[in-house]
Amino acid sequence: MATDVIAIANQKGGVGKTTTAVNLAACLAEHGRRVLLIDLDPQANATSGLGFRKEAGASLYRALIGQTEAESHVKTTTIKHLDLIPSEIDLAGCEIEIARMENYLHRLRQAIAGLVASDRYDFIILDCSPSLGILTMNVLTAAHSVIMPIQCEYYALEGLSVMKRIIDQLRTSGTNPVLEIDGILMTMYDSRTNLSQQVVAEVIAHYPDKVFETLIPRNIRLSEAPSHGLPIIHYASYSTGAAAYRQLAREFLRRRGGDEAEESAVGGLGTNFRHEQPAIGFLSKI
Ligand SMILES: Nc1ncnc2c1ncn2[C@@H]1O[C@H](COP(=O)(O)OP(=O)(O)OP(=O)(O)O)[C@@H](O)[C@H]1O
Ligand SMILES: [Mg+2]
């Protein structure tokens, strides 16, 4: 299987990008997939979420400006099959430097080309900052597909349409002809509120084929896990948050045509669910 490069992006802040990047990466690794998570947000939340300290010179910065090989920044984590390229604040300065360079949208793609070609990983997951700056545009140029987490709240759709337009532009302009939306992931879902249910229904109405059947519930364990430097499945394996991200990983693999045997073993969760009973039907099974 060729290496699949997936961006976790939404220019809106605090919607669950990093939580999704860390936990989807860990759940795919649990399936035996070889995963590299690259933290491309100067806030370095994915880095600390995996228990790493911010360390000068450790980020992809120097690889992005052509001074080092991306491979040299890879760290093995305590989690089997999961590696990390950390971030730190110097990545913020990178934006200005890259903007002045030739091929400024393709710096990340070029930097990770060796890793992608080496077939060392099944998945490379890219965590973005909440902006549409040069780094995020580099991520969208390097990725094969995008997962867009959105929080179940009003205005969710607004951010989504901006992202959708940018993805379409990158594709049609030929900057990244293969880029597609992997899926829209509804996060911080609260089944007790009408608002959550309405937002899910509205997003599904606008993007019927794109919304992941898996909904990520609001779960306190998910917000605690990063302070322990652990993905949810290693921090609170039996929490609803862990169940949701495990389910997301299965759905993600199923959409790629993998893990079919395993899927039938879990009873085909979600079949026909999407257009009939959004959210509630599935969450009651978690
Ligand atoms: N499903 C959830 N239930 C409860 N808390 C959550 C959930 N998902 C994320 N959080 C918490 O919400 C906050 C924002 O989440 P996260 O950092 O993943 O968002 P983000 O989109 O990466 O933010 P930023 O745009 O700043 O990078 C964090 O404190 C996180 O722990
Ligand atoms: Mg983040």
Image: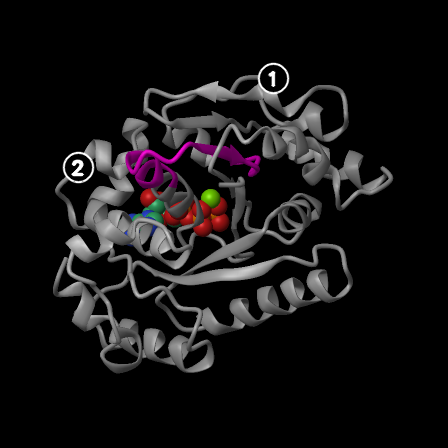
- The amino acid type of the residue labelled 2 equals Ala
Badge 1: few (under 14), some or many (20 or more) residues near its Cα, within 10 Å? few
Q: Residue at x 22, y 45 (%)?
A: 242
Pointer 1 with pointer 2, Cβ within 8 A:
no
| Magenta region, residue range | 25-44
**The image quarter in which residue 45 lies:** top left
Residue 247 position, x and y percent, is 25, 53
Residue 259 against residue 191 in the figure, above or below = above
Q: Pointer 2: what residue?
A: 236
CB at mark 2 closer than 8 A to ligand 1? no
- Above or below, 39 against 279 in this view is above
Classify 140 as above or below 223. below
Q: Name which residue type carries label 1.
A: Ser
Q: Nearer the viewer, residue 263 or 156?
A: 263
- 200 sits left or right of 133 in the view: left
The residue carrying mark 1 is 72
Other-residue count near label 2 (Cα within 10 Å), few / some / many at <14 / 14–19 / ≥20: some
Residue 35 percent location from the top left of the image: 43, 34
Q: Which mark is residue 149?
A: none
At x 36%, y 24%, the residue is 51
In whole angstroms, how far apart are the C-alphas of marks 1 and 2?
A: 32 Å
Asked whether 87 or 114 is in front, the reply is 114
